[in-house]
Amino acid sequence: MYLAKDGGARSQYRRYSEWLAVQPADRLAQKRAEADALFHRVGITFAVYGQEEGAERLIPFDIVPRVLPQQEWLRLETGLKQRVSALNAFIHDIYHDQQILEAGVIPAEQVLCNSQYRPEMQGVDVQGGIYAHIAGIDIVRDDAGEFRVLEDNLRVPSGVSYMLENRKMMMRLFPELFSEHRIAPVDHYPDVLLDNLRSVAPTGVVDPTVVLLTAGAHNSAYFEHAFLAQQMGIELVEGQDLFVRDEAVFMRTTQGPQRVDVIYRRIDDDFLDPLVFRPDSMLGIPGLLTAYRAGRVTIANAIGTGVADDKSIYPYVPEMIRFYLGQAPIIANVHTWMLRRPEDQAYVLAHLPELVVKEVHGAGGYGMLIGPAASKAEIERFRHQIIATPERYIAQPTLALSTCPTFAAAGLAPRHIDLRPFVLSGRGREVTIVPGGLTRVALTEGSLVVNSSQGGGTKDTWVLEN
Amino acid sequence: MLSRTADHLYWMSRYIERAESLARLVDAHYRMSLLPHSGDTLTESLQATMTALHISEAYAAKHATIEPRAVFEFVSLDRDYSGSILSCLRAARENARAVRGSLTSELWVTLNSTWLDARVLAMRGSPGVDIGQFVEWVKERSHLTRGVTIGTMLRDEAFHFTRIGTFLERADSTARILTAHQIDLEPGADASAVPDPYQWSVLLRALSAFEVYRRVYRDVITPFKVAQLLILRDDMPRSLLRCCKEVYGNLKSVANEQSAETERRAGEMHAMLHFTRMEEITARGVPQFLETFLARLRDLGDRVAHDFLVPPAEA
């Protein structure tokens, strides 16, 4: 929250609010217009599905930064490293000895009957034992101001390009702020990512060729794919550019086939290999899984990570941390009711107007009931769905998500925010996080949904150095 | 580099060049339409040009008669016609977007801005657009794109494929414009006859050759010299010889294991133009010469696609 309990600005915002107080309104308005124009020119847009071809939208950018003091960030960073280490250990375990299931910490059917569990990965040794090379962990604050994990994203988390571009934009619009504050830099993210990807190349490869696999220019996150490939200096490939021969992956180049060692893929498991997963996929590479299982190519993130970020597995992550690391979790989960449990279900059905109900396999803010904002009809519709298929749902309390001042039509107003730090894991299970992450903001008053597909915006995120 | 990347770069530059060629043609005819008594000549010239550029059929599907203003609007801003300047600018930008990581950010922003501005114009609707201003703007954007390409891109394969696209398209365009003007140089025809001044000014202006002609020949305009300038002059940037020289040079820089024959044919075309005299061309007839040239150019384009890019069957 922007305001401390005594009504003054929180200490990390003090200097910023003093600066803001003396900015003429028309200068700020002009800077906001400048930001919009620049984002359009540079093409920092996302494609909107189901609209005219080439329809692209800006993700609204708010010029008020979100500020985290160093102490808070350090605690968060430690907690994130702990959590992602445990998640990687969990995925490795699930696809090998399944000790956590043997020990009865997680019910086996929760994992093995999960649609995101990939039997094809059973017994496959991936490079460095790393599955989720790139993780986006969504963080919120609860009423008491404590950070909590709302969701783990271990498949193809996106948004990091906005973290980087938002910083560039703030520095361009308000350079004076950066001389007045000591703000931890973020622009080394692509270097760290490339280092990590190279570190997990198949054994024996000296100078690995890394590529970024995209679904193409019509994918909603295409800007990010092109941006990261360019920043890392690697080829941006589509499925049609790659082929498999003798259990090795090659790309078609103007100088003939060239071997590929590491694929940073930005398409889902289901589309990766039409011979194994969806046969109708035009995006994948036939035979990729064979090469992968033979250890001739690294795929990041690994196939089958979805089993660990599923909302039905999420409630068990604190247990994973205790089980694999023998530590107490540093960042807690948001309390979660699992509706397949009768006692949880009874409670939730009695309290629907106060709760958030989420589909276990939903993503992107779709398939959600936000009790306090829902109509009676919507609540009843969810009630029926829950009773019919309780295993498809979880419920959580409506968090008083923390707010941050944001430009709205009528001037500055508080809006709900969350934070997605990007957690990178490389060989030796070394975990790196650039300070901060992507702050998403719900631009509609009172709204709790920050997803860009649902009209959310973004902010620059500052971690202040002491 | 990726074959698909090379393909997008090649088509990106072809489309920008095509937009510029169309803009030049519209510009030349538009100027002509402002002169008194240009009526029939203008219509004839438009008809011949549209035939040579394969525009007639698409135009006829929307319009019953050839009205200069309607033609200008159709060629410039028709959203449905895939050969309009607007569609070319969109296609150039879509190709650039598919490989934006392989472009310098300056080049990407130039192409993206061109399309964003063109789209705003198109949304306002063609009746409100000043055609003269529009084509002038398209030419400027093309010049800017080319300048940014030359000024910012690393001289690597990406650059060479971009240039191959530019010059194949330009050679095609020059040859078609010459075809449209039916340069009648049958053996024995009076090579010094002074032709219709309108027609020649259209032709030369469309190829930025009007002032060049005066500079080079310091003489009245004759069909023979016009053809010589636009086919055989090595120092004329839009001549067939110049374009073939550039295509050949850039092809040599990207040679791969299977491209030897393509390179040979490009070299042969260049040598043919380099060592041919105008009299030999007129002896066979200029239209016949141009027809053969366009066929060989098409063959070269197909071969480039086959050897380096994404062959049409796979794309």
Image (tube, coloured by chain):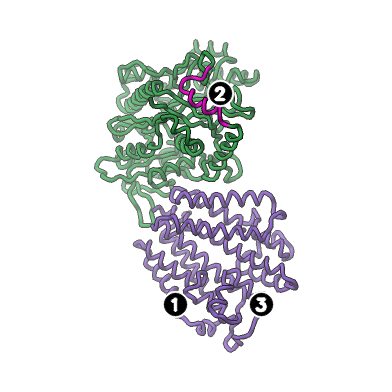
Q: Residues within 10 Å of mark 1 (few under 14, many from 20)?
A: some
Asked whether the beta carbons under mark 3 and mark 2 sit within 8 Å of each other, the answer is: no
**Is A20 one of the magenta-colored residues?**
yes
Which element type, helix, strand or loop, lies under badge 3? helix
Quadrant assignment, res A374: top right
- Residue B197 tag number: 3
**Is B238 one of the magenta-colored residues?**
no
- Residue A448 tag number: 2
Q: Is residue B105 above or below residue B28?
A: above
Q: Residue at x 56, y 13 (%)?
A: A349
Chain ID, mark 3: B
Q: Position of residue B203 (x, y in %)?
A: 61, 72
Name the foreground residue: A61 vs B11: A61
Query: Is A107 left, or right, of A454 in this rendering?
Result: left
Quadrant assignment, res A276: top left
Chain ID, mark 1: B
Chain ID, mark 2: A
Q: Position of residue A289 (x, y in %)?
A: 36, 40
Which element type, helix, strand or loop, lies under badge 1? helix
Residue at mark 1: B274
The answer to whether residue A274 is visible is no
Looking at the colours in the rendered structure, which chain would you say is drawn in purple? B
Q: The disc labelled 2 sits on which kind of residue?
A: Leu
